[in-house]
Amino acid sequence: MKKIISVALSTTILLAGCGLMSNKKEIPETVSVKDYDGRYIGDHDKKNEAFLEKHKAQAEKMYKDYVKEVFGKEAKINGIHSYSNPSPSLKTSEGISIVGTIDYDVPFQFYLSFVEVDGQLALNTITQDQSNEIRGVFAAMLFKRYEQDIETTRRKFKEVVEKDGYYAMNKKLEKHQEFKGVTKQYLDFTTESTIGVEDFKKDFKPVMELKGEAFNQKMDKLIQKYPEIKNKMKTDFIAYYSKDKEVENKEVTRYALNLRKRTNNIMKKINGEKTMYLYEDTVMPDEISSLGLLESKGHKVNIGGGDY
């Protein structure tokens, strides 16, 4: 397989570039996470249209080839965006970002971006060893290892908040999240890692397809070798409340404190950082936050879980 060209740029430039994807007047400022159909995600200004039209097919092929070569898996592309970098000093100002879902035992979101270098489309990476780009696979493998505890906690959170009138982002919007990890209803699960592509292929790729206790034992040994992936686990529990109910911010804050008490014991079963987020039901459909997620403009309350 032809090797994909890679070029590394700084984190700041990449994240800022993603924020310039669209300013079309017909796109509403905010939409509901319950009703949004996803049709504005991926819209772009005219200055990017030619770049996307020129490179779209090649970018999609490079994305799928990368997934096949690195993970040995197939991918379903959920969204493809064009963007412009904000710095006039950059030789390459336009780029294409793709987010998709990797077909694994625990499906995970995978994001790549591409830029034009010397007339050719090239993979745009933050780290030379591509450790930042592939960290979603470690989240998926950790989720598979600790699935019983994580899923039990997620279902408990779902049960509690739905009973109290809160709800999750709809599936059409959820699958378009530019997110490097496992995304499920009410849950975003990630980890940090400095493990590059070569070490992943050598140590983790042979373990991916194992099942049951064989997988658990091998994964436990890898966690001993690379403790950072478990120590840096981050589990976000996310729910939304209707802005039409005219809920006072203080009331949501009080609810969050009460929710922490009701879920504290079960959240202690999960390693790493746990945080609960309660958002007002709005999201900005054409902007990406510095965390790589669709930005909510409504009121937000966040509180730690399982920490007392």
Image (cartoon, helix red, strand yellow):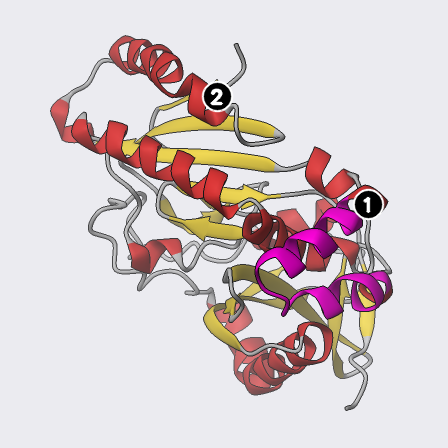
What crowding class fits label 1: few (fewer than 14 Cα within 10 Å), some (14-19), or many (20 or more)? some
What crowding class fits label 2: few (fewer than 14 Cα within 10 Å), some (14-19), or many (20 or more)? many
Q: Is residue 192 left or right of residue 78?
A: right
- Name the residue at 85% across, 61% down: 199
Quarter assignment of residue 50:
bottom right
| Residue 45 pos. (x, y %) | 47, 64
| Residue 230 pos. (x, y %) | 69, 39
Q: Determine the main secondary structure of the stretch shown in magenta.
A: helix
Q: Which residue is mark 2?
A: 305
Does 54 appear above or below 213?
below
Identify the secondary structure beneath mark 2.
loop
Mark 2 belongs to which amino acid?
Answer: Gly
Q: Which residues are magenta?
A: 199-223
- Name the residue at 34% across, 24% down: 299
Say if residue 55 shows up in the picture: yes
| Residue 66 pos. (x, y %) | 69, 77
Q: Residue furthest bottom?
A: 1
- Name the residue at 36% across, 41% down: 186
Q: Which residue is mark 1?
A: 226
